Image (cartoon, rainbow, N blue to C red):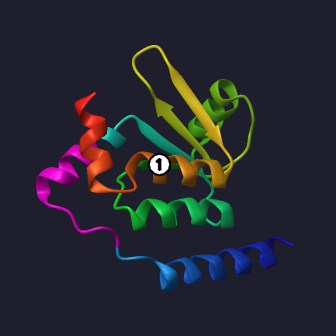
Amino acid sequence: MKLIRWILGRIILVIEWIMAPRGVGRSHEAQRVLDEATQGMTLYQLHTCPFCVMVRHAMKKQSLNIRTRDVRRDAAAKAELIAYGGKYQVPCLRIEHGPDKVEWMYESSDIKQFLQSRFGSTEAVQGSSAG
């Protein structure tokens, strides 16, 4: 069973590589603003999880530089996910809304929808940094 998972994992990674989008081209300033907006975000994931691959695909498509933590390879990340997020489920996007408020967003479709609504266009990024 372990061999089958390993093989399937490699197939998933090859498909991810083949299907990888180019990403949005932005000016250096617009990308800097975007990077600042995503600084308080971390994606807890498993590298070969198909749902995590879909979220990473959405991140790459929008040129989002969001930290990732693989909960299989990083015991501290797994412990944080369980202790603060409340369950061992990936993907999970940790979103800091300020020093005292952190949101743990599960479900790949919810995460992708959040990223699209928040960062779907350069105008949205510039608009969110003004507030």
Q: Which image quadrant for residue 14?
A: bottom right
- The percent coordinates of residue 89 (x first, y second) are 73, 44
- Segment colored magenta: 23-36
Instruction: List the single residue furthest toward the bottom.
Output: 18
Q: Which residue is mark 1?
A: 117
Quarter residue 88 falls in:
top right
**Magenta stretch containing residue 30, yes or no?**
yes
Question: As displayed, is residue 27 above or below residue 101?
Answer: below
Q: Residue 59: which quarter of the image? A: bottom left
Relative to the observer, which residue lies in front, 14 or 121?
Answer: 121
As for residue 108 lying within the magenta part, the answer is no
- Out of 26 and 45, give the one closest to the viewer: 26
Residue at the extreme top: 100
Image side of residue 16 versus residue 64, left or right: right
Q: What residue occupies the far right of the structure in this picture? A: 1
Residue shown at the point (39%, 34%) measured from the top left: 40
Element at label 1: helix
| Left or right: 114 as drawn, with respect to 9 | left
Residue 3 picture location, percent across and down: 79, 77
- Say which quadrant the C terminus sits in: top left
Residue 63, position in %: x, y? 34, 61
Q: Residue 83 in the image: x percent, y percent?
A: 67, 25
